[in-house]
Image: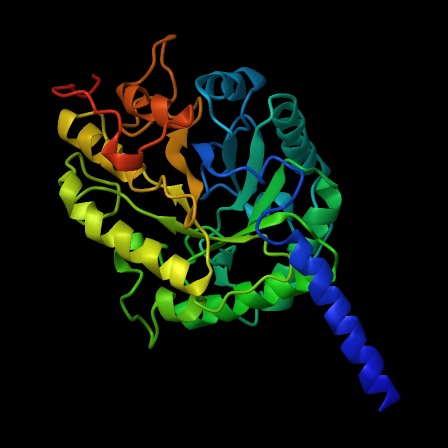
Amino acid sequence: MKKFGSHLFSRLFLSAVLGMTSSWAWADCFSEAPLRGVNMAGAEFNSKTLPGVMYKNYTYPKDEELDYFADKGATVIRLPVRWERLQHELGGELESEEVGAIKKVLAHAEERDLCLIVDLHNYGAYNGDTIDSPEVGMSAFISFWKSLAKALGDSDNLAFGLMNEPFKLDIPVWGNIAKKTLSDLREANVKNLIFVAGGRWSGLHEWFKSYDGASNAEVFDDLRDPLDRTVIEVHQYADSDYSGTHEECKAPDDFNGMFDRISDWAKQNGQHLFAGEFGVPPTGECLQTLNRMLSLMTDSESWRGWSYWAAGGWWGGYTMSVHPQDGQDKPQMSVLEPYLQGISCKGGNCPGAPRNVRVDD
């Protein structure tokens, strides 16, 4: 009886402490909603060449690339990385050169008051073997994240994206892995903001559709973090099959219902959302749709923000790139910039997207 009383007191005390830290009451760059920025792609490039050679097969962003988006008003950079490059042997030591490259990006992000999300861009696998397979195992995944959190050190500007688009795993399997990883990281005193992607391709448009016996809505409605510092990440592209691989875009009105529905779901279940990837080609129709998507994510009660796909100096002529070319802004930036600067869309007072914009040659 005495032990039970002591244990109960400890639990009540912990609940009181955690209660004081809820509702994003943290003194860091993630405490102010919404986060607004871009994916700075490059470190995950050439995934068929692993581990590859840094700055030959893949790249990390330069300081001036971060500066451009910081000057535009961005508050967050999502940095895709590959597990196999950070850890050449499963369960082994982390690669110091790779960790050093991330630390360099983080240091400049801190100088520019940018939040940095380190996004594990592995789709639910390591060297082709899924996290739930005998070859990998959930324990190796959790161990990796503990090691990386320790290696990168304590920074108020650093967050972790557990896994990008884990489509190689069944939704319920990924849900179990994500929740266990979150729990173990908190037990290990990792306090960083954590982004948990939905299963499959994390598509907002199919959030309520059942696959493998369950939907993302069902699997993640009870996601809980004792620190209240976890965000559910969704992705949404605008073309006919929502893959982000076609030049056309669906009409703006086609997205109203799906964004409203997931926003209501988040509020009803005490969750917070972040659009980790979305992007469009630079046509007039697509820019109108981009504008609508951004306007549908201005409700800070359910949305913690977004990061556009994509930026990065190695994109070349990639149609959705918002990286400046020859010193010139891309057409998408004319739509993004007012939102990067934190405009308010209450009462439908949103900036309009320019019309009749042609795709760059």
Which residue is found at the position 70% from the left and 38% from the top? 155
Residue at the far front in the pictured view? 347
Above or below, 194 against 328 in this view is below
Number of numbered discs: 0
Q: Is residue 167 visible?
A: no
* Percent position of residue 104, x then y: 66, 27
Q: Could you tell me which quadrant the N terminus lies in?
A: bottom right
Quadrant assignment for the C terminus: top left
Between 168 and 164, the one lying in front of the other is 164
Indicate the quadrant where residue 154 lies.
top right
Residue that appears at 57% across and 34% down:
115
What colour scheme has been applied to the protein in the rendered image? Answer: rainbow
Question: Residue 3: percent from the left, percent from the top?
Answer: 86, 85
User: Residue pushed farthest right?
Assistant: 2
Residue 66 position within the rendered picture, expressed as x and y whole percent measured from the top left: 53, 22
Report whether 338 appears left or right of 164: left
Residue at 21 percent of width and 46 percent of height: 255
Residue in the foreground of this view, choosing between 201 and 235: 235
Specify the quadrant of the image occupied by residue 36.
top left
Please, which residue is most extreme toward the top here? Answer: 327
Q: Position of residue 335 (x, y in %)?
A: 29, 24
**Position of 308 compared to 110: left or right?**
left
Q: Is residue 234 above or below residue 279?
A: below
* Residue 355 appears in view: yes
Nearest the eye: 208 or 79: 208
Seen from the viewer's position, the closer of residues 130 and 355 is 355
Q: Quadrant of residue 100?
A: top right
Q: Residue at x 38, y 71 (%)?
A: 218
